[in-house]
Image (spheres, grey):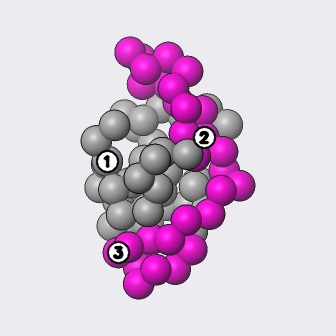
Amino acid sequence: MRRNINSSKICAFCKHWFDPACTAIQPVAPRSGLWEVDANIKKQCLKRNGIEKKADFRCGDFERKSI
């Protein structure tokens, strides 16, 4: 699925979602903020005590990671 990094508040774009290599996202049109997200990938959420969350989940603790 394609998402805009500037408006989507999903785990794949959050700094608390443990994916330091950014394996769940790939740029499609980075200047316009469009990224491809693999929603099937699960990683641990460091803010939620290590609970695994899918890349397209949302929560109130979202903070955008710097890419």
Q: Which amino acid, mark 1? A: Lys
The reply to whether the magenta stretch includes residue 27 is yes
Q: State yes or no: residue 35 in magenta.
A: yes
Q: Is residue 15 above or below residue 6?
A: below
Q: Residue visible at 60% across and 40% down?
A: 37
| Closer-to-camera residue (46/7) | 46
Residue 44, percent from left and from top: 50, 71
> Tag 3 or tag 1, which sits nearer the N-term?
3
Q: Secondary structure at mark 1?
A: loop
| Tag of residue 47 | 3
Whether residues under marks 1 and 3 lie with C-beta atoms below 8 angstroms apart, the answer is no
Instruction: Report the magenta residues as a range.
Output: 24-52
The residue positioned 57% from the left and 55% from the top of the image is: 55
**Crowding at mark 3 (Cα within 10 Å: few <14, some 14-19, many 20+):** few
Task: Give the Cα distance between marks 1 and 2.
Answer: 15 Å
Residue beneath disc 1: 65
Q: Residue 16 has which mark?
A: none
Q: Position of residue 38 (x, y in %)?
A: 66, 45
Please report whichever mark, 3 or 2, sits nearer to the chain's N-terminal start: 2
Question: Which quadrant is the C terminus positioned in?
Answer: top left
Q: Residue at x 46, y 56 (%)?
A: 19
The numbered dot on residue 37 is 2
Q: Residue at x 33, y 56 (%)?
A: 15
